[in-house]
């Protein structure tokens, strides 16, 4: 590669269609974009504009109907389900609107889980999980179950879980939507701080102008199309 | 993919998540598994009881003179084995048979006429001459240690009192109850029974210490001494092998006894083999009509039969043999029938439990779609997810199965304690109901493996569906 600093994500003409009986829903239409390493990118747009769908495509959770996607030098649109699983496990982290922690696991075990998937030795993963929980400010809550924590605390655990494998990219679909605005701001600040520390790229979808205002790179979606990228 | 202990732990926690539902499922598996094991134990007991009863009556193999089995019954003399002692030694010393052998004995089976001189009643009868102590060992063959009917208190009136026969009492015999009724032995015997050695003066008292234990139905379990004395006798006649005048002798009645079957009870007089041989072959060495081979284990029947066949072939012996289940095909028919019933119940229960687990697993997975999507997003492979869910189903089966084993073991003890006695078909005395669960662990293994297989099979489909789900679709449920 001649480019000295290739982008982390290069998407070309990404499309996703859903078939609903006779009707075809074009959730994402021919989106091309590129995202730098370590960027803090926010996707915004009205409801139904295809933010989540695009995020799922970028997170290798869904296969595009057409188009190509390259993440960290890997042509992910060509990978098998198994290879994609391994790719997600090593390279990507996810943060969800409703936190999606494993309810039977404690905060610490939730953060350890991605390392179990990646076969990190147990003692090493314990140390890393503890450090990670400390850095999200939950060092005192490691043995709490998700039901024993507030939404903000749960989302902090989720952030720790998403980052513990030191992924290239963390994808977050409306991470503040289930939180009050003050907590949402804290969570955003935390993500910024961790992005700065780790150099991990974040792609966040949101309705929230507060979130959108913190973007280094803004993507505006409308009717499945990219309306602005800058 | 994930170290297994942790998966195990996670699966257990997931089972603990909906306690009531998991407990209900585990209980259902436990009851089915326990029920299956108990039913299996009952079947096993039935098989063994009938096997012991059959082998106890016929031995494992009976060796006859060639043609006896087809035609010999009408003319036992023509089909008798004259060199019993030599043949017995020959078989006992065979290196193949010897280690498997429990005992070899001989018997004479013949038909004749019997008259009771007391009542002048007479009847045809089937005579069975045996070696008394050897015959007793055959009758008591009990390798499975299931409870011996003769030791049950409720059977005391039948089995107590003097032994049926005695090695030293050559002329003594025992008469089946039905035959005794025909010969009107009961009433007169009681009246006639002399009490030479006993001091009890009353004729009304049961002759418990008397030599003749005819009044066994009222007998107390008391002292049983085999005092010699004048006993009521029967006159018997048989047609001699060479024709001419019938041979006659008499036997003293030691006891009236129930027999394994009604048919036998109505016809059989059992006596000392030497007495029978002398009656049929006066002045000749001991003859038998059948050599009875009793083995340590029924499993060796076929091996010993094959060995006997090769002995017969190589030494040109004029002999044939029959296996115990050929002599009494009832065993095979019964095991086949009960075996089919068992298989049917087994399959029914397995299918029922499979549906139950399927139902639990399906709803369990439906409730966790969001979580499943999350796991897949984090990089758990389809196979990894499938294995995780299968492990949960397997653990349900494992826990349920283990509880089932405990239930079955407990059931075994309880049935023992309850002391259920009944008279099984075709037998004339009480038997104690048992379920051979602990003594025949194969039924436990069967039921346990059934629960495991069942839980795996019924988890497989829901787990597979979940693992194939689109990640985005699953995540929508979070
Ligand atoms: N599984 C699906 N089947 C059919 N149509 C779908 C499916 N998923 C999304 N869509 C459609 O695709 C379009 C984009 O949906 P998407 O969820 O990406 O929008 P969004 O921008 O995330 O909206 P919101 O802000 O409400 O979350 C919508 O019209 C939606 O109805
Ligand atoms: Mg959305």
Image (spheres, coloured by chain):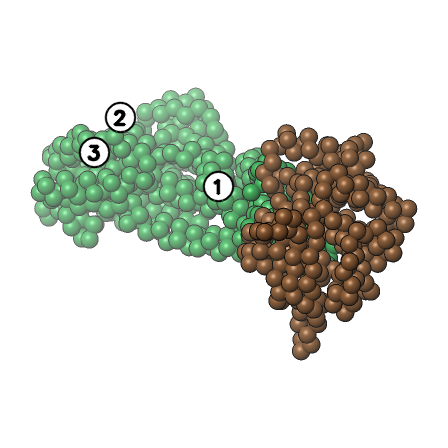
For the N terminus of chain B, the image quarter is top right
| Chain B tint as drawn | green
**Residue where numbered disc 2 is placed:** B168
Determine the chain carrying the residue at label 3. Answer: B
Give the image quarter of residue B302: top left
Question: Real-space Cα distance between discs 3 and 1?
Answer: 33 Å
Task: Indicate which label's residue lies in the foreground, 3 or 1.
Answer: 1
Residue B96 is marked as: 3
- Some atom of ligand 1 lies within 8 Å of the CB belonging to the residue at label 1: no
Q: Are marks 3 and 2 in contact (CB under 8 Å)?
A: no
Q: Residue B388: in sight, yes or no?
A: yes
Q: Residue at 72%, 39% (x, y): give it.
A: A198
Q: Residue furthest bottom?
A: A22
Q: Secondary structure at mark 3?
A: loop
Question: Real-space Cα distance between discs 1 and 2?
Answer: 49 Å
Task: Indicate which label's residue lies in the foreground, 1 or 2.
Answer: 1
Task: Please state the horizontal and vertical placement of residue B80, each as a whole percent of the image.
Answer: 15, 43
Q: Is residue B301 left or right of residue B258?
A: left
Q: Are marks 1 and 2 in contact (CB under 8 Å)?
A: no
Which chain is in brown here? A
Q: Residue at 54%, 56% (x, y): give it.
A: A80
Q: Is residue B223 left or right of residue B393?
A: left
**Residue where numbered disc 1 is placed:** B445
Circles 3 and 1 on the same chain: yes
Q: Residues within 10 Å of mark 3 (few under 14, many from 20)?
A: some
Q: Residue at 32%, 39% (x, y): give it.
A: B298
For the C terminus of chain B, the image quarter is bottom right
């Amino acid at each position: 590669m001649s480019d000295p600093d290739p982008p982390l994500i290069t998407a070309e003409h990404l499309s996703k269609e859903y078939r609903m009986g006779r009707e075809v829903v074009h959730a994402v239409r021919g989106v091309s974009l590129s995202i730098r390493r370590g960027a803090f990118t926010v996707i915004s747009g009205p409801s139904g504009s295809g933010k989540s769908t695009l995020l799922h495509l970028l997170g290798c959770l869904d296969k595009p109907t057409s188009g190509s996607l390259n993440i960290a030098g890997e042509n992910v649109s060509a990978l098998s389900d198994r290879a994609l699983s391994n790719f997600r496990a090593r390279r990507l982290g996810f943060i969800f609107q409703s936190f999606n922690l494993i309810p039977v696991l404690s905060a610490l075990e939730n953060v350890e889980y991605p390392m179990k998937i990646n076969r990190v030795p147990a003692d090493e993963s314990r140390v890393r999980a503890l450090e990670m929980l400390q850095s999200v400010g939950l060092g005192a809550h490691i043995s709490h179950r998700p039901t024993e924590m507030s939404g903000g605390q749960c989302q902090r655990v989720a952030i720790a879980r998403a980052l513990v494998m030191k992924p290239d990219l963390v994808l977050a679909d409306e991470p503040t939507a289930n939180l009050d605005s003050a907590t949402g701001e804290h969570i955003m600040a935390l993500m910024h701080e961790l992005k700065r520390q780790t150099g991990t790229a974040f792609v966040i979808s949101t309705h929230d102008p507060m979130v959108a205002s913190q973007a280094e790179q803004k993507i505006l979606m409308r009717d499945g199309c990219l309306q602005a990228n800058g | 993919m994930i170290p297994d202990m942790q998966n195990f732990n996670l699966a257990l926690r997931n089972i603990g998540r909906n306690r009531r539902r998991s407990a209900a499922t585990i209980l259902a598996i436990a009851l089915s598994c326990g029920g299956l094991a108990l039913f299996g134990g009952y079947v096993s007991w039935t098989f063994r009881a009938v096997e012991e009863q059959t082998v106890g009556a016929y031995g494992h193999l009976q060796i006859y003179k060639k043609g006896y089995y087809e035609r010999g019954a009408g003319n036992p003399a023509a089909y008798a084995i004259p060199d019993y002692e030599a043949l017995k030694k020959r078989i006992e010393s065979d290196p193949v048979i010897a280690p498997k052998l429990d005992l070899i004995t001989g018997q004479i089976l013949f038909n004749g006429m019997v008259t009771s001189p007391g009542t002048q009643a007479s009847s045809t009868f089937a005579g069975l001459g045996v070696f008394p102590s050897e015959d007793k060992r055959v009758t008591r063959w009990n390798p499975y240690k299931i409870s011996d009917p003769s030791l049950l208190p409720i059977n005391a009136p039948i089995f107590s009192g003097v032994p049926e026969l005695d090695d030293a009492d050559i002329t003594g015999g025992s008469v089946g109850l039905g035959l005794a009724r025909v010969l009107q032995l009961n009433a007169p015997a009681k009246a006639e029974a002399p009490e030479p050695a006993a001091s009890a003066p009353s004729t009304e008292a049961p002759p418990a210490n008397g030599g003749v234990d005819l009044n066994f139905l009222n007998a107390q379990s008391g002292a049983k001494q085999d005092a010699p004395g004048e006993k009521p006798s029967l006159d018997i006649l048989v047609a001699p092998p060479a024709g001419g005048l019938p041979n006659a002798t008499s036997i003293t009645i030691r006891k009236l006894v129930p027999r394994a079957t009604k048919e036998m009870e109505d016809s059989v007089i059992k006596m000392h083999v030497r007495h029978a041989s002398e009656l049929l072959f006066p002045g000749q060495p001991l003859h038998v009509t059948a050599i009875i081979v009793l083995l340590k284990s029924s499993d060796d029947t076929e091996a010993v039969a094959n060995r006997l066949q090769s002995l017969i072939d190589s030494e040109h012996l004029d002999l044939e043999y029959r296996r115990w289940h050929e002599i009494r095909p009832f065993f095979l028919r019964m095991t086949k029938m009960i075996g089919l019933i068992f298989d049917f119940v087994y399959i029914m229960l397995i299918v029922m439990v499979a549906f139950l687990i399927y139902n639990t697993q399906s709803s369990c997975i439906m409730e966790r779609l969001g979580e499943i999507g999350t796991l897949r997003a984090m990089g758990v492979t389809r196979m990894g997810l499938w294995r995780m869910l299968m492990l949960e189903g397997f653990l349900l089966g494992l826990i349920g199965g283990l509880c089932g084993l405990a239930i079955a073991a407990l059931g075994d003890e309880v049935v023992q304690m309850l002391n259920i006695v009944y008279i099984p078909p075709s037998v004339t005395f009480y038997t104690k109901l048992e379920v051979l669960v602990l003594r025949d662990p194969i039924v436990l293994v069967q039921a346990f493996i059934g629960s495991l297989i069942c839980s795996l099979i019924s988890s497989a489909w829901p787990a597979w569906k979940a693992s194939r789900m689109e990640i985005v679709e699953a995540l929508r449920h979070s």
